[in-house]
Image: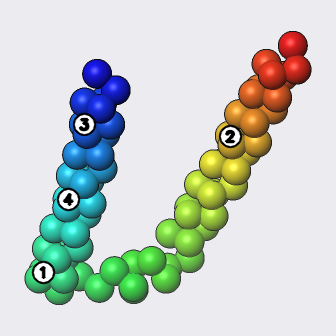
Amino acid sequence: MIKHQRNSHQKGFLEVIVIILIALILLRFLGINIDVILSKEPVREFFIFCKDMLILVWEDFLKIITVFRNS
């Protein structure tokens, strides 16, 4: 059962990577330059915001794990 779950998770991860690669190839084919999009200030601010939120969530998760381990 565990081996089956591991294979399905790995399969899902590989599917996501393939979809991302296809999307990047399609954007390149359509002449859309991703570097230009990513270098715009609002996009950079959004990524910084997402990074900060992920850090906060991770720190809260670690605090919760610590509380449960100590109790």
Give the residue pinned by disc 4.
19
Question: Which one is in front in this view, the residue at disc 1 or the one at disc 4?
Answer: 4
Left or right position of 50 against 55: left
Mark before the other along the chain sequence, 1 or 2: 1
Question: Which one is in front in this view, the residue at disc 4 or the one at disc 3?
Answer: 3
Residue beneath the point at 45% across and 77% down: 38
State yes or no: discs 4 and 3 in contact (Cβ < 8 Å).
no
Q: Is residue 23 visible?
A: no
| Vertical comparison of 28 with 67: above or below | below
Q: CA distance from mark 2 to mark 3?
A: 26 Å
Give the residue pinned by disc 2.
57
Give the residue pinned by disc 1.
30
SS label for mark 1: loop
Q: Residue flagged by tag 3: what amino acid is it?
A: Ser
SS label for mark 3: helix
Q: Quadrant of residue 41?
A: bottom right
SS label for mark 4: helix
